[in-house]
Amino acid sequence: MTNLPPGWAEVRLGDIATSVKNGIFVSRPGADPGGVPILRISAVRPGHLRVEDIRYTGQNAEALAEADSLLDPGDLVFTRYNGNIDFVGACAIVPQNVGPLTYPDKLIRVRVAASVASSAFIAYLFQSPRVRPQVRALARTTAGQAGISGASLKSISIPLPPLAEQRRIVGLLDNLLSRWNAGLNALNATTRRADRLREQVMYAAGVGRLAGESSKNSAPPPDPAGVVDGELPDIPGTWQWKRLGEIADVVGGVTKDGKKQADPDHVEVPYLRVANVQRARLDLSKVALIRVSPKKAEQLRLLPGDVLLNEGGDRDKLGRGWIWEGRIPDCIHQNHVFRARIADGFLHSKLLAWHANGGFGRSWFQANGLQSVNLASISLGKMRLFPVPVPPLGVQDYLVKTAEYHLSMLDGMEEAVSVARQRAANLRASLLAEAFAGRLVPQDPDDEHASELLARIRAERESALPKQKARTRRTKKELAAPPTRVTGDDYQQEAFPL
């Protein structure tokens, strides 16, 4: 680190830390109150600790206090392990007025000397472009988990201003970033409103509201089929209710079999997973490859206009999906993604996709899905019974064009929000960079220099070290004495046999 402002010093985190300690191991923390609350890994986000994101240890506070495993206000909590490297080394400060609280072994607690450093200053520093590259360089990945050790954290080089200047920097950052957060919240609120409007447009297109048709003489519902249809929306009397299996060929995809991946007779093709099939869009940034038989590759090859609908995942994501547009040749789909191929000319694929992703579709899939311990799913048989409103052919093109007009305006709004969000992220990074280069607040020559603070803490540490006993010279007889071991209930010493 070079070009530090007057009064600043380059230090290691370990130089100003009084304690660096891994958390406790709890095999099965409980959701029900009992014992001391323990933070979850997800509680730590850069600059923010969600103290409500907890489980319970079943241990009492006295035992954890004796083991020095409780968190105090002002402590810094770092993410030790995370599947996302961007969250490794994420730092948050424990707020005031928290009760007994402990932390798991995937987090690290760091206490800094209050006479030298402000915890809030360090928490901001670990969000800055001055420190984050060091954290990434020190992180190690094992079995898909990125991690950083306490020793590596202690070795990170940081700029340290005088304590009074640290407090001035924190005060101004608090003020500026609170306004920055307000702006970001406004952008997020705009995104949520756009999402609600998008869902309303999809719903209105699927049931005919965008066509201006009257639904006073609504079409009769489909025959009962052993599923929970709930309250069907009213559709014009000129429309029809059909079950999905009546208007489309609905099939499941390929199940990955590791034993067959080396079969020389198989062909390698791209295939879509649940992660690729998002609500009203496809994410094709990462498409995996799989080896299947030529016959299976031909059977499951996707064609433009096929509607893809997810079979499993979180309950609110059942049935989400979108239309295949043929962007990747010879692509197939996995068994957790259903493909609906609509009979020629019967229904525009976008009307089906909008209906499935709209409010009614989401509610229907949730009502008819099955919930296991961690995942929800819907069977192929039930998927074929999904009720679909079918308008006359002459109305379908008008509905699609009208919906696309409204959705394109929402796309433009979301693109503008995305650009604004990126600019906001750049602004925040620049603000932190300026703060830790010493250009955010003025220096005061009367502030005690950081080097003087460090000299004082080193002196305090040396004075706290236990005094070593003077070494005494041992006789040859003493040096030749055999080693001993402790035995028996009365702890008599016994010579080991030579």
Image: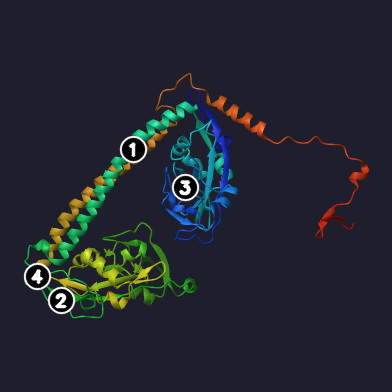
Q: Which mark's residue is nearer the viewer, 4 or 1?
A: 1
Q: How far apart in space, not on screen, are marks 2 and 3 (Cα)? A: 57 Å
Q: Which residue is mark 2?
A: 221
Q: Which residue is mark 4?
A: 236
SS state under label 1: helix
Mark 4 or mark 2, which is nearer the start of the sequence?
2
* Amino acid marked by disc 3: Gly
- Left or right: residue 104 versus residue 293 is right
Q: Is residue 491 above or below residue 456?
A: below
Lower sequence index among marks 2 and 3: 3
Question: N-terminal of the two: label 2 or label 1?
Answer: 1
**Residue identifier under label 3:** 99
Q: Is residue 157 above or below residue 103?
A: above
Residue topped by disc 1: 178
Of the two numbered discs 1 and 3 on the same chain, state the one appearing first in sequence.
3
The C terminus is located in which quarter? bottom right
Under mark 4, the amino acid is Pro
Circle 2 or circle 3, nearest the eye: 3
